[in-house]
Image (spheres, helix red, strand yellow):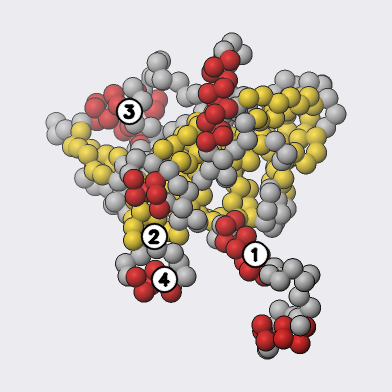
Amino acid sequence: MVMTSWYVAIGGKQEGPYSTAEILTNLQNGAYTPNTYVWRQGFQNWLEISQCPELSLERVAPPPTMPLRGAADEIDFQIIGSEMQYVEIELDSQESAVAEAGSMMYMSDNIQMHTVFGDGSESAGAGFLDRMLGAGKRLITGEGLFSTIFTYQGPGKGKVAFAAPYPGKIIALDLKEYGGKLVCQKDAFLCAAKGVAIGVEFQKKIGTALFGGEGFIMQKLEGDGRVFVHAGGTVIQKDLQAGETMRVDTGCLVAMTQNINYDIEFVGGVKSAIFGGEGFFFATITGPGHAWLQSLPFSRLAGRIHRAMPQNNSGFSTKGEGSVLGDLGNLFER
């Protein structure tokens, strides 16, 4: 009997060969997830472990010592709208959703809201220091110290809705499908099922930390529930094979799975960097894994608005956007 040799893609690098038993053992102890990419002879492309029948999770007992964080509530939802979207979450009795303070749009009667330190994922018996640590992580990632938890306490079902802060798209992601963890830009989180933990993801390389657009710190969403992430413009998902690399504007990267290797690359020439309008650095993402990109980063939108605003404190400009005179038209207003 010929032993099957497997190769595994971790952090953009290939490891192996491993036997089937070794792959199953690593899957059982949590070293791999169902979304980890593998390859063996006979495969045309790299596949996720969950797509390989011989590595079926039914052959592996659930890891007893490494459950996913959170045990989040199961929630139903509907995303409504096109450019200015909001998400409506349906809650059963005693179910909860957690959201950024100030993002609530409307809610049913019998929904109780209360504000907590951190993200509400700490256990009921968590001490003061644990709660302060959770709140501190949120502050580091650019979020507020407090979150608001919405709990339905009536019969039947209740609804609560959360609105996007600027034009774009809301995407719903189930953490169970991505190994219990996603990494995203620090202001992307909108709301989630209660039990999802919002933490800090430090960039390991100094170049990524200094020039990565999102800086040294990104958000880490962990747990087994559903999260809702907001991004500007149109959002697309890119599925990268092992070793496949894509260069992205640093502000356009919204979220990525934990297997993605993220780094920074210089544009390549001083002339292109200064006059090309694209900045000095690109983000390079290397598979295997999934990445979500946005077409309109908020920083780009804010920059266009700032340039369009009057700069001489004389009120709004009266010339049209299509004026052939451009700034020369202001000569007649002085």
Q: Give me the C-alpha separation between circle 2 and circle 4.
A: 11 Å
Residue count near mark 4 (Cα–Cα under 10 Å), binned few <14, some 14–19, many ≥20: few
Residue that badge 4 annotates? 274
Q: Name the residue under label 1.
A: 306
Disc 2/disc 1 C-alpha distance (Å): 23 Å
Q: Give the spatial CA distance, label 4 vs label 1.
A: 20 Å
Cα gap from disc 3 to disc 1, whole angstroms: 47 Å
Vertical relation: 205 (above or below) 157: below
The tag earlier along the polypeptide, 2 or 4, is 4
Choose the circle earlier in sequence order: 2 or 1.
2
Residue type at mark 1: give it: His
Residue that appears at 40% across and 53% down: 211
Secondary structure under the numbered disc 3 in the rendered image: loop
Q: Mark 2 points at which residue?
A: 281
Q: Position of residue 130 (x, y in %)?
A: 54, 18
Image position of 181 (left or right of 43): right
Comparing 301 with 285, the one in front is: 301
Type of the residue with mark 3: Ala
Residue under label 3, please give it.
31
Q: Between marks 4 and 3, how big is the CA–CA gap?
A: 44 Å
Q: Quadrant of residue 51?
A: top left
Q: Is residue 233 left or right of residue 59?
A: right
From the viewer's side, name the closer residue of 91 and 282. 282
Camera-nearest label, 2 or 4: 4
